[in-house]
Image: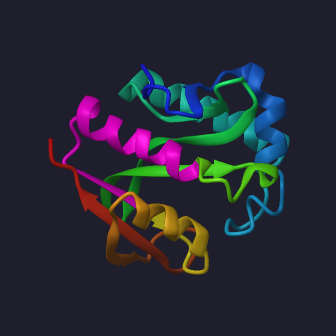
Amino acid sequence: MTPPNTQRLRLRRMRPADIELMADMLGDPEVMRFYPAPKTREQAARWITWNEENYAEHGYGLWIVETIDGEFVGDCGLTWQEVNGELKLEVGYHVVTSRQGRGYATEAAIACRDYARDVVGSPELVAIIHPENEASERVARKLGMRRLEDDHGGTIPVRKVLGMTLEP
Protein backbone atom coordinates (compact mmCIF):
# COMPACT_ATOMS: atom_id res chain seq x y z
CA MET A 1 0.00 0.00 0.00
CA THR A 2 1.00 3.58 -0.57
CA PRO A 3 -0.54 6.92 0.36
CA PRO A 4 -3.28 8.04 -2.03
CA ASN A 5 -2.44 10.36 -4.90
CA THR A 6 -2.36 14.05 -4.10
CA GLN A 7 -3.50 16.81 -6.42
CA ARG A 8 -0.16 16.77 -8.31
CA LEU A 9 1.69 13.67 -7.11
CA ARG A 10 1.58 9.91 -6.82
CA LEU A 11 3.73 7.72 -4.61
CA ARG A 12 4.81 4.18 -5.47
CA ARG A 13 7.19 1.57 -4.14
CA MET A 14 10.86 1.79 -5.06
CA ARG A 15 12.19 -1.08 -7.12
CA PRO A 16 15.60 -2.08 -8.49
CA ALA A 17 14.66 -0.60 -11.89
CA ASP A 18 14.75 2.85 -10.20
CA ILE A 19 18.52 2.69 -9.74
CA GLU A 20 19.32 5.38 -12.35
CA LEU A 21 16.82 7.85 -10.86
CA MET A 22 17.93 7.18 -7.30
CA ALA A 23 21.67 7.14 -8.07
CA ASP A 24 21.35 10.50 -9.86
CA MET A 25 19.35 12.10 -7.04
CA LEU A 26 21.28 10.62 -4.09
CA GLY A 27 24.57 11.32 -5.87
CA ASP A 28 23.72 15.00 -6.42
CA PRO A 29 25.85 17.14 -4.06
CA GLU A 30 23.08 19.77 -3.87
CA VAL A 31 20.36 17.27 -2.84
CA MET A 32 22.75 15.64 -0.35
CA ARG A 33 24.46 18.77 1.00
CA PHE A 34 23.19 18.12 4.54
CA TYR A 35 24.41 14.51 4.54
CA PRO A 36 28.02 13.53 5.22
CA ALA A 37 28.48 12.94 1.44
CA PRO A 38 26.53 12.19 -1.72
CA LYS A 39 25.81 8.50 -2.19
CA THR A 40 27.54 6.27 -4.72
CA ARG A 41 25.60 4.11 -7.18
CA GLU A 42 26.23 1.12 -4.89
CA GLN A 43 24.88 3.07 -1.89
CA ALA A 44 21.84 4.10 -3.93
CA ALA A 45 21.20 0.42 -4.75
CA ARG A 46 21.45 -0.36 -1.03
CA TRP A 47 18.97 2.49 -0.36
CA ILE A 48 16.47 0.77 -2.67
CA THR A 49 17.10 -2.61 -0.99
CA TRP A 50 16.67 -1.03 2.46
CA ASN A 51 13.28 0.33 1.39
CA GLU A 52 12.23 -3.02 -0.07
CA GLU A 53 13.12 -4.56 3.31
CA ASN A 54 11.05 -1.87 5.06
CA TYR A 55 8.04 -2.63 2.82
CA ALA A 56 8.35 -6.34 3.65
CA GLU A 57 8.76 -5.79 7.40
CA HIS A 58 6.50 -2.80 8.07
CA GLY A 59 4.35 -2.32 4.97
CA TYR A 60 5.88 1.11 4.30
CA GLY A 61 9.19 2.85 3.70
CA LEU A 62 10.33 5.65 1.44
CA TRP A 63 8.33 5.71 -1.78
CA ILE A 64 9.18 7.12 -5.19
CA VAL A 65 7.38 10.44 -5.73
CA GLU A 66 6.26 11.22 -9.28
CA THR A 67 4.03 13.82 -10.84
CA ILE A 68 0.64 12.49 -11.90
CA ASP A 69 2.16 12.44 -15.42
CA GLY A 70 4.94 10.11 -14.23
CA GLU A 71 7.89 12.52 -14.00
CA PHE A 72 10.34 11.72 -11.20
CA VAL A 73 10.28 14.19 -8.27
CA GLY A 74 12.15 12.35 -5.50
CA ASP A 75 11.32 10.11 -2.58
CA CYS A 76 9.23 10.51 0.55
CA GLY A 77 7.93 8.17 3.18
CA LEU A 78 8.07 6.65 6.62
CA THR A 79 11.01 4.90 8.27
CA TRP A 80 11.99 3.97 11.80
CA GLN A 81 14.93 6.03 13.06
CA GLU A 82 16.78 6.15 16.34
CA VAL A 83 16.51 9.41 18.26
CA ASN A 84 18.64 9.53 21.39
CA GLY A 85 18.38 5.77 21.80
CA GLU A 86 14.62 5.51 21.13
CA LEU A 87 12.97 4.36 17.89
CA LYS A 88 10.68 6.96 16.32
CA LEU A 89 8.67 6.93 13.11
CA GLU A 90 10.11 9.58 10.82
CA VAL A 91 8.81 11.20 7.67
CA GLY A 92 11.70 11.77 5.28
CA TYR A 93 11.89 13.43 1.87
CA HIS A 94 14.31 14.27 -0.94
CA VAL A 95 13.44 16.26 -4.07
CA VAL A 96 15.60 16.48 -7.18
CA THR A 97 17.23 19.87 -7.57
CA SER A 98 15.27 20.82 -10.70
CA ARG A 99 11.96 20.40 -8.83
CA GLN A 100 12.82 22.01 -5.50
CA GLY A 101 10.90 25.07 -4.34
CA ARG A 102 7.55 23.99 -5.83
CA GLY A 103 5.94 22.55 -2.70
CA TYR A 104 6.39 18.93 -3.76
CA ALA A 105 8.13 17.87 -0.52
CA THR A 106 5.34 19.39 1.57
CA GLU A 107 2.61 17.82 -0.57
CA ALA A 108 4.18 14.36 -0.44
CA ALA A 109 5.01 14.64 3.27
CA ILE A 110 1.41 15.62 4.13
CA ALA A 111 0.22 12.48 2.32
CA CYS A 112 2.74 10.43 4.33
CA ARG A 113 1.75 12.12 7.61
CA ASP A 114 -1.89 11.25 6.96
CA TYR A 115 -0.92 7.68 6.01
CA ALA A 116 1.03 7.35 9.29
CA ARG A 117 -2.04 8.49 11.20
CA ASP A 118 -4.83 6.76 9.25
CA VAL A 119 -3.22 3.51 8.04
CA VAL A 120 -0.22 2.85 10.27
CA GLY A 121 -1.99 4.15 13.39
CA SER A 122 1.17 5.79 14.72
CA PRO A 123 0.60 8.06 17.73
CA GLU A 124 3.43 10.40 16.72
CA LEU A 125 5.67 11.38 13.81
CA VAL A 126 9.05 13.09 13.74
CA ALA A 127 11.39 14.70 11.24
CA ILE A 128 15.13 14.57 11.92
CA ILE A 129 16.82 17.55 10.31
CA HIS A 130 20.35 18.90 9.92
CA PRO A 131 20.53 22.14 11.96
CA GLU A 132 21.27 24.23 8.84
CA ASN A 133 18.58 22.71 6.60
CA GLU A 134 16.02 25.50 6.77
CA ALA A 135 14.00 24.24 3.78
CA SER A 136 13.46 20.85 5.39
CA GLU A 137 12.48 22.47 8.67
CA ARG A 138 9.90 24.63 6.84
CA VAL A 139 8.36 21.46 5.37
CA ALA A 140 8.16 19.85 8.84
CA ARG A 141 6.54 22.95 10.30
CA LYS A 142 3.96 23.01 7.48
CA LEU A 143 3.01 19.48 8.54
CA GLY A 144 2.26 20.83 12.02
CA MET A 145 5.50 19.78 13.69
CA ARG A 146 7.31 21.70 16.39
CA ARG A 147 10.83 21.47 17.79
CA LEU A 148 11.08 18.64 20.33
CA GLU A 149 14.74 18.04 21.05
CA ASP A 150 18.18 17.61 19.58
CA ASP A 151 19.47 14.17 18.61
CA HIS A 152 23.08 13.43 19.48
CA GLY A 153 23.47 9.93 18.04
CA GLY A 154 23.60 10.26 14.27
CA THR A 155 26.33 10.75 11.71
CA ILE A 156 25.89 14.51 12.20
CA PRO A 157 26.91 15.54 15.76
CA VAL A 158 23.60 17.30 16.50
CA ARG A 159 20.35 17.06 14.54
CA LYS A 160 17.09 18.91 15.19
CA VAL A 161 14.11 16.72 15.94
CA LEU A 162 10.71 18.16 15.14
CA GLY A 163 7.59 16.17 15.84
CA MET A 164 3.87 16.02 16.37
CA THR A 165 1.17 13.92 17.94
CA LEU A 166 -1.04 12.19 15.37
CA GLU A 167 -4.64 12.14 16.51
CA PRO A 168 -7.23 10.01 14.67
Task: Name the residue: 83% across, 47% down.
Answer: 40
| The quadrant where residue 65 appears | top right
x, y percentage for residue 125?
Answer: 31, 53
Residue found at the very far front of the displayed protein: 7
Whether residue 75 can be seen here: yes
Task: Name the residue: 50% across, 61% down.
Answer: 139
Q: Quadrant of the N terminus?
A: top left
| The quadrant where residue 114 appears | top left
* Residue 116 colored in magenta in the image: yes
Q: Which residues are magenta?
A: 105-127
Q: How is the image coloured?
A: rainbow
Q: Quadrant of the C terminus?
A: top left
Residue found at the very far left of the displayed protein: 168
User: Is residue 45 placed above or below 28 in the rendered structure?
Assistant: above
Q: Who is closer to the viewer here, 133 or 56?
A: 133
In the shown orientation, is residue 151 left or right of residue 10?
Answer: left
Whether residue 85 can be seen here: no
In the shown orientation, is residue 158 left or right of residue 15?
Answer: left
x, y percentage for residue 39?
Answer: 78, 51
Task: Name the residue: 72% across, 24% down.
Answer: 70
| The quadrant where residue 38 appears | bottom right
* Residue 115 colored in magenta in the image: yes
In terms of secondary structure, what is the magenta stretch mainly? helix
In the shown orientation, is residue 67 left or right of residue 56?
Answer: right
x, y percentage for residue 43?
Answer: 75, 43
